[in-house]
Amino acid sequence: MIRTLAAASLLAAAPLAAQSIPSPDKVAALRDAALKGDQYAWDITEGLTTEVGPRLAGTDDEARARDWSVRKLTAMGFANVRVETFDMPVWVRSRESAEILAPFPQPMVIAALGNSASTGPEGLAGEIVAFDNIEALRSAPDEAVRGKIVFIDHSMPANQDGSGYGQFGAPRRQGPTLASKKGAAGIVIRSIGTDHHRNPHTGVMTFNDGARPIPAGALTNPDADQLLRILKRGQPVRMKIVLESRNLGTRQSGNVIAEVPGRDPSLPPILVSGHLDSWDQGTGAVDDASGVAIAAASAKRIMDAGRPLRTIRIVWFGAEEVGLFGGLDYRARHGKEPHYALIESDFGADRIWKVESKLGDARKAEAEAIGKALTPLGIVTGSFTEADGSDIGPMLADGHPGVGLSQDGTRYFDLHHTPDDTLDKVDPAQLRQNVAAWTTVLAILSGGIEEPKARKRR
Amino acid sequence: MIRTLAAASLLAAAPLAAQSIPSPDKVAALRDAALKGDQYAWDITEGLTTEVGPRLAGTDDEARARDWSVRKLTAMGFANVRVETFDMPVWVRSRESAEILAPFPQPMVIAALGNSASTGPEGLAGEIVAFDNIEALRSAPDEAVRGKIVFIDHSMPANQDGSGYGQFGAPRRQGPTLASKKGAAGIVIRSIGTDHHRNPHTGVMTFNDGARPIPAGALTNPDADQLLRILKRGQPVRMKIVLESRNLGTRQSGNVIAEVPGRDPSLPPILVSGHLDSWDQGTGAVDDASGVAIAAASAKRIMDAGRPLRTIRIVWFGAEEVGLFGGLDYRARHGKEPHYALIESDFGADRIWKVESKLGDARKAEAEAIGKALTPLGIVTGSFTEADGSDIGPMLADGHPGVGLSQDGTRYFDLHHTPDDTLDKVDPAQLRQNVAAWTTVLAILSGGIEEPKARKRR
């Protein structure tokens, strides 16, 4: 995931009037049924990760994921199932390895960062110049860096709210450009992750300000620890990195969309979302199969209960990981249309611990009703003037209303963007709590559910 | 590690007379000082894993480890530091990968088992035939297996005493031979491990009974889970494995030996040991840098305290992982010589929870004194007729006396034989508890320590 916090409105959307709030008993019944028995979310998470597996943006794997999704959402009974395609540049990794050449020869485990230059099969060898953090690199003279392989360390903590990722992710986001501008031959960073396994964390970066692309990779945390120990011996350290990759040029990605049609199609829809693409080394179970699953499962539970007043639109965004292409395409097509609320799940499937919203003063009663209805799930109510999301971030920043359901992120960055992001990391009980929370929010926002008429008995 | 339990004497060694037991106060003082402040074991573990790294038996890496060890043990002040070399066959891995070809194409993570046949760079593709366990493969007709890639599952539990490894390790030890004899083209097993990470567990196996070597690899637990899910869909599953490896022929390995000379060189020595070699993908921190460190650190602590009555012999065995070559060489050279006790650390560095011994009836008082002195470290006393170890296993089985200090193995098989066996997995506090326990045992077995005469003051 990439996070965009949208506290401020950059573009005023038309204010939306409040609507009546369904009875707490009806909402609670839907919530508790989801908590007790939801299978839809597990079914989608298991199916997508098993039958498609990794699905890097713009690749044939992601195209297979779209086909799978259209079949799945159609089979679940949703309406208007469709794909909105868009073009995007595609980068793919191939072989990668790293080794210390001197003073203590030994292999290391590395992954290329997205958009890394390729070393070619012969690799790149050079002396390591190490920095404790991005600021130390920023203030280093070019002479100290020129022709060398930069290593940037950091000390990212595991926080429940995931706040370490923004602050401590700078080595990945800005490090390659900085190193390149100073004349470095390549760059390796400590993985932007909180685990202690030999699984490197990849992630996207771009070379800005005209910086020449250079090879850029992430070492695992144990390898970064080892490199530091070797550096502390005081001898020059030479490393060889092989990071082969290719730019495939422009390829197609797309957003998969499906709907629960509202009784009044003229009303702005509620958008529930996650992203369909994943990084290429895991199966993207927590990032973000579980997210698309939670969004669709909660919409399905409302659909099973009856017809909501307003339409619920499910969007499974394409190409999030590599630059929010899906979110930006949706915004370009639909960003001027009113939406009643935007919600996205892109932070794993551990329990939701906080709800925030940005529905506007006129809808404070709705926001408060949501908080109250979520309390039995152990969810605290936070801000009424903030909501966040990755693909929906730009539209939230434009001024669209939104709700943010925050998962516990304590172990999220153990898995994020690694080969370890696999189905066994999803806890079915916590996944159900997520669906229960989302179902609760949809029950309140959807303007009342008209139950199906009882079938005639024969 | 490879474990050999030696409850029975196959060859009667000369019974050894009991000796006087040092005062409990002196033993307790040595124990508590180690628990509080030992740095020797960390220093060795950190140094060997950092300055040498992986050290596969028979390779240049293991030779560098021997050189490092001789320098280190000499610098620590031990006497008679030497290497006893021996020849052994050497197998090394190179490139390895796996992928599902159909019905759901996706990559998997695999490692070759030691002595696997090489697929060559073109790899091996075939249909998977799956078995729940080794017995199911054993009873399968050859026609069901012929020309296919066998997959064997199992359900190894994490136990404190590590007992899952013996029982549930059969797919690795016997699976390849069984599969080959039934005409399989190759075999993949669920890693013999208890973790949920994408790091496969390698380990040695041999093709017995004239079985033709075939490619044999271990999938990670998450990949084995995924393969089962794919198989459950009911369609034929085709996999491609690339397991490149080479047999380098006969190469040299060796045991590194050092001593704390006893006051009476005619007395049988106490042997304290671990193994110097490691698997090639991690740095062998828990298997077995910490083991050789614990053995040497406890001997060093006795040496610091004064001169023991009998010699303490440190042996850092070579080539344990690939077939106990070091232990068997030591036995061939010294197995007829009496030893007062054999002790080995080869089960990580988590806290020792149990002591067992096989010192004979005449030395029951010694064995009981050991149990009593270890109680303050939270260690329970087990059998007086058993001791175990990997390299020392054959000599224990021959009838030599021994002491077994059992580490808590609950998380050992999360790391064992994987890239994840790195220094960050060693807990310095638990490592000190190990050294304290070993120092206690040596203080009791060494026959009394003569403290150095006070230096004359000028």
Image (spheres, coloured by chain):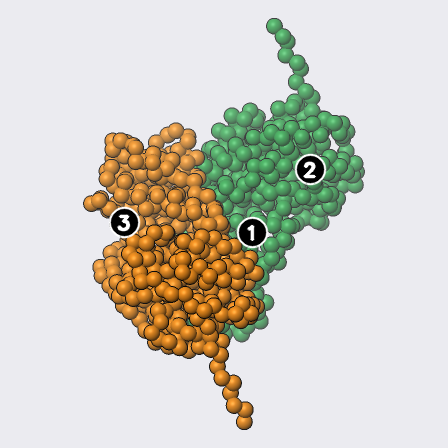
Chain colours: A green, B orange
Q: Which amino acid type corresponds to the residue marked 2 in the rendered image?
A: Leu
Few, some or many residues within 10 Å of mark 1 (<14, 14–19, 20+): many
Towards the viewer: A357 or B376: B376
Q: Secondary structure at mark 3?
A: loop
Name the residue carrying label 2: A377
Mark 2 or 3: in front is 3
Sequence-earlier tag: 1 or 2:
2
Name the residue carrying label 1: A413
Mark 1 or 3: in front is 3
Q: Which residue is found at the position 47% from the left and 64% from the top?
A: B441
Tell me whether the residue at label 2 lies in contact with that at label 3, contact meaning CB atoms closer than 8 angstroms: no
Can you say whether A236 is above or below A179 in the image? below
Rendered image quadrant of residue B98: top left
Q: Which residue is found at the position 55% from the left and 24% from the top?
A: A77
Q: Secondary structure at mark 1?
A: helix
Mark 1 or 2: in front is 2
